[in-house]
Image (spheres, rainbow, N blue to C red):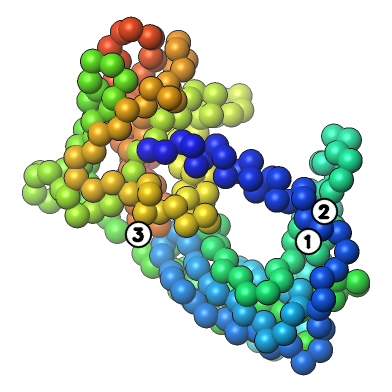
């Protein structure tokens, strides 16, 4: 619906990562407590608020509950593993930028650690699954954990069965109409949220041999993660019949896809149309039969 956000926000995130300030802000490593509140849970994300009692650098994370880890009985071991894992991810990230001859790269504390009160959206989650949400203080000089582990358990919601099916048409120029119908009644629906977007073929087929189903799924996962992480759900939601002119985003002669799906912990129960726009010609939408519509 609003590709501007999908394009600008990742660029802003990259700029922010590169422009972090090396050198430490005022911080504490002792006698710091962290308040963790679960603000929202869905089938596709966990939203949590973290608030340290003093200025401090800390890690805030979420992971699926598994027998491989025991944070309840071995919190120090768990904190060390999580800190080391995050630092390894940082080294991989830094290596890619240094390899490209970037003149400045943020240090670990400014790139990977939280500071001050923070709201985090964890989007790499599965529906109907148990997760740990955790936090602990880190000394930015040694990158080692300090103090206590703050741990809470949450359960993501299950995904609804598909509630809508979609049809789309175009006007004589560059506008798209989307019609959501209830699967139960067959009537137009006006109370279930959905969204739609245009993706170009090179955004779907990102590697050789990738199927349309895999490409659509990956594109929707990335789009949904961006929407949720930057609190854009309301601006991407549509209800009832919706129309939007897409002239700003249509590329002449480029095979493209109109992707429509329900908002339910992701962009799910999708309907996809293929088209190629040519300036001055009416768009022909061709339905795509996806073997995996979830």
In x, y percent, where is residue 68? 68, 72
Q: Residue at x 89, y 40 (%)?
A: 103
The residues bearing labels 2 and 3 have C-alpha atoms spaced at a distance of: 38 Å
Question: Which residue, given by chain and number where applicable, does mark 1 sit on?
Answer: 110
Question: Which residue, given by chain and number where applicable, does mark 3 sit on?
Answer: 159
The residues bearing labels 1 and 2 have C-alpha atoms spaced at a distance of: 6 Å
Badge 3, how many Cα within 10 Å: few under 14, some, many 20+?
Answer: some
Q: Residue at x 81, y 78 (%)?
A: 27
The extreme bottom residue here reads: 31
**Contact? badges 1 and 2 (CB < 8 Å):** yes
Question: Which residue, given by chain and number where applicable, does mark 2 sit on?
Answer: 106
The residues bearing labels 1 and 3 have C-alpha atoms spaced at a distance of: 36 Å
Which of the pair 27/165 is nearer the observer? Answer: 27
Mark found first going from the N terminus, 1 or 3: 1
Q: Residue at x 72, y 85 (%)?
A: 54
**Contact? badges 2 and 3 (CB < 8 Å):** no
Mark found first going from the N terminus, 2 or 3: 2
């Amino acid at each position: 619906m609003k590709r501007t956000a999908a394009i600008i926000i990742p660029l802003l995130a990259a700029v922010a990562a590169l422009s972090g300030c090396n050198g430490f802000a005022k911080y504490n490593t002792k006698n710091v407590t962290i308040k963790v509140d679960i603000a929202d849970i869905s089938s596709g994300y966990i939203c949590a608020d973290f608030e340290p009692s003093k200025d401090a650098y800390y890690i805030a994370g979420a992971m699926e509950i598994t027998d491989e880890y025991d944070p309840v009985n071995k919190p120090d071991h768990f904190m060390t593993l999580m800190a080391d894992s995050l630092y390894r991810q940082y080294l991989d990230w830094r290596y890619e930028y240094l390899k490209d001859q970037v003149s400045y790269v943020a240090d670990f504390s400014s790139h990977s650690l939280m500071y001050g009160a923070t709201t985090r959206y964890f989007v790499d989650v599965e529906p109907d699954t148990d997760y740990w949400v955790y936090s602990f203080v880190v000394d930015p000089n040694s990158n080692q954990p300090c103090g206590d582990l703050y741990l809470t358990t949450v359960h993501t919601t299950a995904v609804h069965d598909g509630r809508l099916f979609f049809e789309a048409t175009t006007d004589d120029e560059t506008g798209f109409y989307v019609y959501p119908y209830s699967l139960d009644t067959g009537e137009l629906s006006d109370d279930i949220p959905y969204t739609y977007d245009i993706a170009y073929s090179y955004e779907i087929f990102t590697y050789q041999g990738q199927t349309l189903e895999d490409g659509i799924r990956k594109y929707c996962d990335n789009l949904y993660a961006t929407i949720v992480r930057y609190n854009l759900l309301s601006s991407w939601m549509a209800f009832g019949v919706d129309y939007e002119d897409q002239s700003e985003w249509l590329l002449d002669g480029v095979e493209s896809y109109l992707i429509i799906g329900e908002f339910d912990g992701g962009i799910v129960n999708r309907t996809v149309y293929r088209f190629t726009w040519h300036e001055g010609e009416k768009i022909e939408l061709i339905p795509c039969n996806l073997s995996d519509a979830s």
